[in-house]
Amino acid sequence: MAEQANLHLEGMLPELKDLEQRGIFTKLEIKSIVKKRTAFEYGIHRKIVKKADFLKYIEYEINLERLRSKRKLRLDQTSGKGKRGVTLSDYSIVCRIHQLHQKALGRFSGDIRLWLQYFEWCKRVGSSKALGKSFAKAIQLHPTKPIFWILAATWEFEENSDIASARVLMQRALRINPTNQKLWIEYFKLELLWVEKIKERRRILFKEDLDNMPIDTNSSVNDKDTKSETDDCIDICKDGNDESSQSKNVEVAKLEIEAELEPTLIEKDKAITESQNHDNNEMMKKELTPLQKTLLEVMVPRAIYRNAIKAFPKDLSFSLAFLEIYKQFGKGSVLGIEEIYQSLKVNFPEDPEALCIFAEHHVLFVQETDPLFPAALKKSISTYQTNLEAHPTSTLWSKYIAFMRSKRSICIIPELIRYLDILILRAYNACHTANCSTILLYLEWTRWVNDQDKTDIIDKALSAFPSSSLLWLEKINNLESIMEKKSAFEKAISLVSNAEKCALWQWYCQFTIECSSSPSEVQTAFETSLSASQLGGTKDEETFKELYLDWAITQPDGLELFRKIRTTFTNQKLQSIEFFQKCIGIETQQWMSQMADGNISEAEKTKHALETLWKGAVQVDRSRLDTWLGYIRFTFEICKDPKCAAQLYWMAGKEVDDKDELERQFQEMKL
């Protein structure tokens, strides 16, 4: 271990001498660098090395390189030893960071995050060759991890402009991982992006629009200029045959796992195999062959989708993921969108979500300012109505109404707005008649009518959902007299399940506070709500206790009433930590107020009450660190009793798991 570490340190001497000679680091700084590197080298050459040792070393070297670059720039060392001022120290640290990453990956090759960190660093410093080799190595070690295939293909397409290599990588990935949906979607995106890239270049060069349809323009560019621009664009599109370009590519050797695999659906597809022979250069010619024109009509993405749904024939969300991607590419992908609609009709003829997609496709890419918008909207509504006649479900009704409401919100034609208002009200009524309405739909319906009709709608809703607390609250809030409200509440509380009673009791307690002048009546309301037959023992019990305590402390004799209620609760059973925290917060505020007013006798009583509460809090969960720390802080800051605090610290040390944090915070409190 020591020999290897010393060997690496000796190899750093020329670099360190160069840094000192160029004045980038002083002698003292060089000594500090050697000391740090020595510690790191011994750390990574131990028998049992940790990933953290490598990460700390890498972080140090990255920061050191950043500092070296800044100082070189400040010293304006553009000319010096070596060609154009480049010497050993200009690249040695970067090389070391590469070596450290590669050593770490050799030891921890299964750590995906470590690979991704290395990829990001290579991109940041522009190490294209190292990145290409690293992608290949990662794929060889982890052929079933889609993330590596996707990153490698993205690198080939975006950085190397090599669509052929990117395609090969994605097709090999799908051969090994045919059931990975992410790979299908990313390959689909790749081909769509390539088509969009070609269309955009042709639009610039030949004045074609994004749908690949020539437009009539009186361009002043002559044939010679056009040819020159075309040649430039072709040069940009070239995959690159020079040595430096090839060295950047991701070259993954044939994997053992591939030897036993049969060709995938993608590789058997005629449309995809024919497209492989058409590179960027051929697609940039002014006159395209029929096949090349078909390629620009998203032929390959359509073929990918067809093969993808063969692998996942009954996965609606998977099919819709392709549809959403198509929509991002606009009208140029209409043929692909239509193909998805047809496949959805075959595979999901009765699915409510698919039926909604069918209905709404009429308004796709049609803006509300377009003269065709009203006709397209009516077609969508008509399709929705036809689907509802055949498949009347709550989901479909909800989506139909939501669709009309969303279109109404963006509509700018007054007649169309009135037309939609009528249809929306009819839809709510028809949904109720078909017994397909939901609680949410009933509540939405009440917001579309006047107060006179609202009561009738709520009654209809309660006849369908008599145990809904939301509907009962809506009914109660629409009543005028206090007696009517109380009567409705009593009826509601007898019908609603315990799980939904919290909202009703919360309304009733607030209503009692506002309408009653007697605190005893409010107390009765809170105590009844917390009884075993109501909220007692439910998840809402703690919430109501806090509301009860908050109300009590605001009364004229609030502190006395609060303590009485608190004592009643603590005598019944051991309360939760949240209950104790609430009480401690209130008592602490009282103590601070009493001390500020100079009321020492009352402050002493409050201090004793706080001590009782802290003792109760630690009993709830004796392993809870923050409770022990709060208790210790109380003895330091309020009781002014360091001896008691030390005893509590000793007791806490036996109970809590994180003893280091306990020690750290205790020492801070002592200062």
Image (cartoon, rainbow, N blue to C red):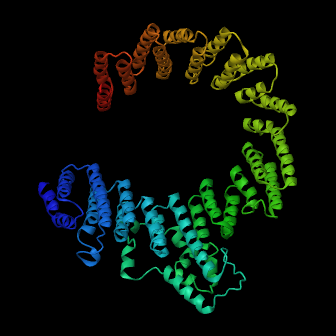
- Where is residue 202 drawn, in percent x and y? 61, 80
Q: Residue at x 29, y 63 (%)?
A: 71
- Where is residue 639 drawn, in percent x and y? 36, 15
Q: Residue at x 66, y 66 (%)?
A: 330
Which quadrant of the figure contains the N terminus? bottom left
Q: How many marks?
A: 0
- Where is residue 446 drawn, in percent x and y? 80, 36
Which quadrant of the figure contains the C terminus? top left
Q: Nearer the viewer, residue 435 or 295?
A: 295
Q: Residue at x 19, y 67 (%)?
A: 21
- Where is residue 283 drawn, in percent x and y? 57, 82
In the picture, measured across the screen, residue 207 lies left or right of residue 34, that is right
Relative to 503, say whether 227 is above or below: below
Relative to 159, say whether 649 is above or below: above
In the picture, measured across the screen, residue 512 lies left or right of residue 621, that is right
Relative to 552, say whether 258 is above or below: below
Q: Residue at x 69, y 81 (%)?
A: 214
Q: Quadrant of residue 556?
A: top right
In the picture, measured across the screen, residue 68 lies left or right of residue 156, that is left
Q: Is residue 105 visible?
A: no
Q: Nearer the viewer, residue 584 or 425?
A: 584
Q: Quadrant of residue 662?
A: top left
Q: Nearer the viewer, residue 206 or 588?
A: 588
In the orientation shown, which residue stands out farthest toward the left?
3
